Image (cartoon, grey):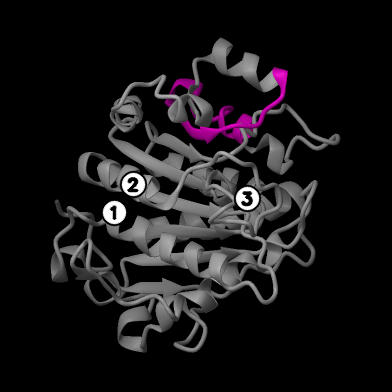
Amino acid sequence: MHTLDTESNFLGLDASRSSLEGSKIAIVSAPYERTVSYGHGTAGGPQAILAASHFVEFWDEEFQRDIGKDIGIAALAPIDFTDATDEAALSLIEDQVRRLLGLNKFVVTLGGEHSISAAPVRAYLEKYPEITVLQIDAHSDLRESYEGNPLSHASVMARICESVSPGRVVQVGIRAQCQEEFERIRKEGIHTFFSWKIRQGLYGQSWMERVLDALGEQVYITFDIDGLDPSIMPSTGTPEPGGLLWDETIRLLKLIGKHRHIAGFDLVELAPVAGTPGPDFLAAKLVSKILNAAFANCQSGTDAGAGSEYTY
């Protein structure tokens, strides 16, 4: 597996902190775009995040660490989807994530459209059979199929629920869905925290604690960037009003990182807009923040080395 050099990897890390052998974290770029239904451009998301990350500070004053230095982050060359669509494309992603998990890496997958998330979840389930999936998103993505394609971005959570018990799926920020999805949530027992209910205080003042209570010990996060409000994240295919804001998102991630084991995550649906670098930078910093939350309880140095398991 070929890794990117300092000029193009995550954070612009030098070779001593970005080799696959010496890093605990591995970043998979999956620039796959096939089923987007409104705005386009998600295929450019991974490269835009990596490029913007070069302007994110190494040191995080909130977590008081330089995670690239402490843990090491290797960014792999993008997956080539030239001759692969639908299940064949998902298989390419799943195979790469599975190989990295076999090397005891913490894997971050950058999309691309949201349909790609089914692949890393399948790989993670082999290592963590009881894993909970936390979906931060504007949309439920629970349609059985969309525009005739069951592997659509609008059906990704329906596919994930075929391998993960619906009761182990937790959705946060949902504010757009069809009746089929609404009824499926109630019928199958999916834990859904609607954005409008959060805003109106209908989950109480401790809605984040309720999210935490719904999660198991091992958590995989699939983060659709449109889960954020378009006032801070306009560069996405379907920007829905009423989304999460930065500070509350980071508070939620910190809470989960403190009390649960974030085992891996993906970030999808960034559609870069030329001349508008702010959203790209936000996405890159969000990747850094999730990593810091995931490793907040992990010891630095040799205990967190590339060949070891997590040490809390």
Q: Within 10 angstroms of label 2, few (less than 14), some, or many (20 or more) residues?
A: many
| Nearest-to-viewer mark from 3 and 2 | 2
Q: Secondary structure at mark 1?
A: helix
To which quarter of the image does residue 211 belong? top left
Identity of the residue drawn at 16% across and 54% down: 311
Q: Secondary structure at mark 2?
A: helix
Instruction: State whether residue 50 appears in this view.
Output: yes
Rounded to the nearest whole Å, what is the CA distance between mark 1 and mark 3?
23 Å
Residue 293 tag number? 1
Residue 231 rendering spot, x and y as whole percentages = 56, 53
Residue 116 tag number? 3
Q: Within 10 angstroms of label 3, few (less than 14), some, or many (20 or more) residues?
A: many
Q: Secondary structure at mark 3?
A: helix
> Amino acid under label 2?
Leu
Residue 63 as seen in the image, left or right of residue 36: left
Is residue 143 magenta-colored?
no
Asked if the residue under mark 1 is in contact with the one under mark 2, i.e. CB atoms within 8 Å, the reply is yes
To which quarter of the image does residue 252 belong? top left
Identity of the residue drawn at 60% across and 32% down: 175
Foreground of the two, 220 or 252:
252
Q: Earlier in the sequence, mark 1 or mark 3?
A: 3
Q: Is residue 35 above or below residue 307?
A: above
Foreground of the two, 40 or 61:
61
Residue 250 as seen in the image, left or right of residue 38: left
Residue 90 rendering spot, x and y as whole percentages = 65, 51
Q: Which residue is mark 2?
A: 253
Q: Which residues are magenta?
A: 157-179
Identity of the residue drawn at 46% across and 75% down: 53
